[in-house]
Amino acid sequence: MKTKNELCRGTYTAIVTPFTLEEDVDWKSLEGLIEFNIANKITGIVPCGTTGESPTLDYEEHDEVIRYAVEVVAGRVPVIAGTGSNGTREAIKCSRKAEESGADALLLVNPYYNKPTQEGLFRHFGAIANQVGIPIVLYNIKGRTGVNLETDTLLRLIENHKNIVAVKEASGDLGQIRDVIKRTPEDFYVFSGDDNLTMEVLRSGGDGVVSVASNAFPDEVSGVSRAWFRGDHSRAEELDSRLRVFYEKIFVETNPIPVKYILSEMGMCNEVYRLPMCELFEGHKRVIKRFMAEDPLFENR
């Protein structure tokens, strides 16, 4: 299997951040979710990403969630810590702290709201790369940040910063994703940032997925990549087909609202968010409850 530094191909869970009823971080539930994922063959854990509701964590909590995830994982799988920000100084500070805490790699999202130019993106990511020694995964998600990391800019970053080793591509643009796969070096990783595009990314030569769905079904979701990379493509297609409806359900509202609701129904965390995130619409709850009662995925859960 292709490897570089602490990373490898496969399925990484963008782990949710559970909260208590008082909206504090629920450390016991977080530990349980991480252990559940590791026991079910996940490739790695990604704390403090979009699914982890990082925008509503304060600075101290953000650092502590990463430190705690590293402690619980205890070297069994890679931890890719979400440390991106719309301010470069803040992202550097958070990235250094994650490195000190023992994270194996960093996930750096495009700066959001301020909509930097491509030159601004190049300087932003480059400045962070110069301040840390661990691998960096860039996170391209225009729908959340308002700016797209163009392939030419990505190639400049790869050429100038050897610790930029991967990209999580959540642009939703298959043409761009295929172009990235085609033009980046052989040892550079391209992960899908959308569960429903994982199969297309794998077919195109990509390296796996940073997944929302694997929070609830780590074995099944990671099984798609495992089957694909051992050459059993028909099995990968079959597993992906079984998960298709589930992928639809976890995005009926803004991530991570639906998947957190599903995890609460599975008894793994509370359905608690921090504003401006709020609970799932009652109509969607009814649809998901019916799906959970009828779909074979949930038979033994």
Image (tube, rainbow, N blue to C red):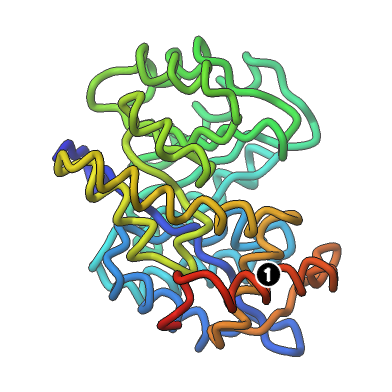
Identity of the amino acid at label 1?
Ile
* Quadrant (top left, top right, bottom left, bottom right) of the C terminus: bottom left
Q: Where does the image place residue 40, in percent across and percent down from the top left?
A: 30, 71
Q: Where does the image place residue 67, in percent across and percent down from the top left?
A: 45, 70
Mark 1, residues whose alpha carbon is within 10 Å: few (<14), some, or many (≥20)? many
Tell me if 59 is positioned left or right of 115 in this view. Answer: left
Depicted 279 relative to depicted 226: above or below? below
Which residue lies at the image location 39% right of the left edge and 54% below the top edge? 12
Depicted 31 relative to depicted 220: above or below? below
The answer to which of 85 and 238 lies nearer the viewer is 238
Depicted 277 relative to depicted 6: above or below? below
Q: Where does the image place residue 44, in percent across and percent down from the top left?
A: 34, 58
Depicted 57 relative to depicted 92: above or below? below
Tell me if 232 is positioned left or right of 71 in this view. Answer: left
Q: Where does the image place residue 281, in percent across and percent down from the top left?
A: 84, 68
Which residue lies at the image location 53% right of the left edge and 30% below the top edge? 125
* Quadrant (top left, top right, bottom left, bottom right) of the N terminus: top left
From where the camera sits, is residue 249 visible? yes
Which residue lies at the image location 58% right of the left edge and 23% below the top edge? 173
The answer to which of 284 and 15 lies nearer the viewer is 284
Q: Secondary structure at mark 1?
A: helix
Which residue lies at the image location 69% right of the left edge and 40% below the top edge? 87
Residue 291 placement: quadrant: bottom right
From the image, tell me which residue sits under label 1: 288
